[in-house]
Amino acid sequence: TEDKYKLVGGYCDIFTRGSRRKWDQLVYIDLFSGPGFCRIKETGKILKSSPLIALSLPIPFDKYIFRDNDPLSIKVLSARVSRNFADKNVLYINKDSNSAINEIKSSIPAHGENKTVLTFCFIDPFDLNIHFETVKTLAENKLVDILILQAYYMDANRNYDNYIKEDNEKISKYLGFSNWRQEFQKSKYFPTDFVNYLAVKYDDNMKKLKYLEPERSSFKIPQKNVKLYYLSFYSRHALGNDFFKKVQTYADDQLKLGI
């Protein structure tokens, strides 16, 4: 978790530093914002999480959009932001991410000839509950770089027996098409490599939206060598991928943000 937030913070920092002079407005979206801090269960350590990291940047975004299902998380986050970042332009949305996406998209300032807008969206779900249609809606007709947690090991692998059943729609919604089972069973990944099938199909979907081949970091529990998830970065611009590569190489030394 700490490594994840260092990577997110490092990319936010290089994003705003590298884009500030080229773009009139920079927008940060956090689709699973939480209350702003998180406690590490095993150690009790309290970390500043992604919303407060993004707000703490030396070179800030112009607008922040925070969405969370939990009304208490939104209330607590709002109080913390009001106390420490009262000058920031912040929008809070307390709705399901998939049903709120049109509202979120409409809240991004319009990109035009006289006002250029670039958006960075961090998507940090606990499982594969973000619909591909949601990501597609956000990305269409907008310039959006996306960093998404893909819970392929801690969700897809663990729940494979449930997801392969015909009456389970979770993977269909995650990938954005319903005949994935037939395709998976005919593929070279069947039956033992469900994770790589999902990763390749998701990348293919993003390429159809004109995104480049992603940069991807793998996260695991070091003591047990147990894989958990990927953080995958999708950009339509090679410079975005270059930024993310740089952050991966020195994330441990990035930012003094209290994390």
Image (tube, rainbow, N blue to C red):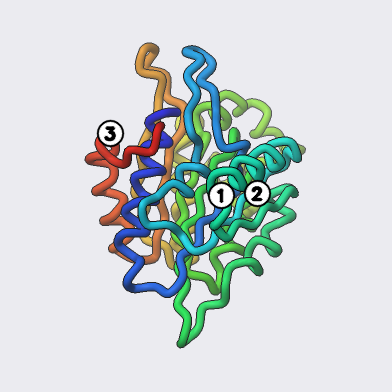
Q: CA distance from mark 1 to mark 3?
A: 22 Å
Q: In the image, 71: left or right of 133?
A: right
Q: Quadrant of the N terminus?
A: top left
Q: Quadrant of the C terminus?
A: top left
Q: Secondary structure beneath disc 2?
A: strand
Asked whether 250 or 170 is in front, the reply is 250
> Which badge, 3 or 2, comes first in the chain's sequence?
2
Asked whether 69 or 217 is in front, the reply is 69
**Which residue is denoted by mark 1 in the rendering?**
30
Asked whether 215 or 77 is in front, the reply is 77
Residue at the image point whose x is 51% and y is 34% from the top? 152
User: Label for residue 172?
Assistant: none
Relative image position of residue 125 (x, y in whole percent): 58, 39
Asked whether 17 or 58 is in front, the reply is 58
Is residue 58 shown above or below 160?
below
In the rendered structure, which amino acid carries the disc numbered 3? Asp
Residue at the image point whose x is 69% and y is 64% from the top? 102
Q: Secondary structure beneath disc 1?
A: strand
Is residue 179 shown above or below 153?
below
Relative image position of residue 208 (x, y in whole percent): 48, 65
Is residue 253 shown above or below 141?
above
**Which residue is denoted by mark 3 in the rendering?**
252
> Which badge, 1 or 2, comes first in the chain's sequence?
1
In the rendered structure, which amino acid carries the disc numbered 2? Arg
Q: Is residue 179 visible?
A: no
Relative image position of residue 55 (x, y in whole percent): 48, 49
> Which badge, 1 or 3, comes first in the chain's sequence?
1
Whether the residues at callouts 1 and 2 have beta carbons within 8 Å, the answer is yes
**Which residue is denoted by mark 2 in the rendering?**
67
Relative image position of residue 82 (x, y in whole percent): 62, 47
